Image (spheres, rainbow, N blue to C red):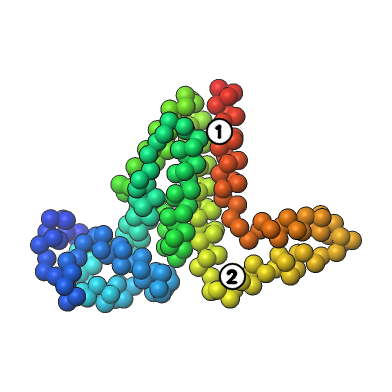
Amino acid sequence: MAKRVVPEADRRRRKPTKQGVVLSDRLIVETALRLLHEHGREGLTVRRLGAALGADPSTLYRYFRGTDDLTLAIADELVGRAMRGWRTTGDWRADLRELGLRIYTAYLAHPEAAVLTASRVSGRANEIAADEAVLRVLRSTGLPDPEVVRVYHAFIDQTLAFAALDAASLALPEKARAADEAVWRATYARLSPDTHPNIAATAPLLVARMNHSAYPTALDMLLDSAEAALRGA
């Protein structure tokens, strides 16, 4: 059964933990991000989190209904970090490009958290603010709302999909990631043009590109499509 979440005002009146800190939603989320970085997704447990905070694990249920509720809070924190300092300039394309790169970068700064949260919809304040901002920028172009929503959908899903894909690679053990990256040079670049003419013809280009994220390219392609729709409208 889900446990009652104590209002924020009541939480602030709690005594400091054994480590001399007063618990808050934000402190718990930041500690969870650190544990994900240090121990991976399997290491994020209520018991380990309580130990890191110097608090009884059961105390955490005064702030979150469970680990899934905490996961949604982590997702919202990553979006919030992306949004901090972002301002519109009046150039809709530049604004969306910057915001997409900010969200992508914020997630990749915490690969384990990104893999855990990129597929989730939190419905929390930062996520809602980001969605409102993207829709505001797109609607300012004069595109009809069905087209606005089509581009918005592609923009959000593409950003989070690339964040999850690239974060999963970063979250691999270093040896496994290095082995994957070496395949392009060690295998693809050595294929015979007699058996694989197209790979052989493009091998140097593949080696140069394939170990880097395609997100900036994909983002520009999406914005090109939106710009073409705007010209057509």
Q: Which mark is residue 177?
A: 2
Which residue is situated farthest in the top direction here? 233
Whether residues under marks 1 and 2 lie with C-beta atoms below 8 angstroms apart, the answer is: no
Left or right: residue 185 versus residue 176 is right
Q: Position of residue 99 (x, y in %)?
A: 44, 44
Say few, some or many: other residues with alpha carbon within 10 Å of mark 2 (under 14 / 14 to 19 / 20 or more): some
Q: Nearer the viewer, residue 125 or 86?
A: 86
Q: Position of residue 1 (x, y in %)?
A: 25, 64
Residue drawn at (55%, 37%) of the image: 223
Q: Quadrant of residue 31?
A: bottom left
Instruction: Answer yes or no: is residue 26 visible.
Output: yes
Residue drawn at (24%, 60%) of the image: 25
Residue drawn at (47%, 27%) of the image: 141
Q: Position of residue 111 (x, y in %)?
A: 46, 63
> Up-down: is 161 above or below 21?
above
Q: Quadrant of residue 194?
A: bottom right
Secondary structure beneath dot 1 equals helix
Residue position for label 1: 226
Secondary structure beneath dot 2 equals helix
- The three-letter code of the residue at mark 1 reads Ala
Which residue is situated farthest in the right direction here? 194
- The three-letter code of the residue at mark 2 reads Arg
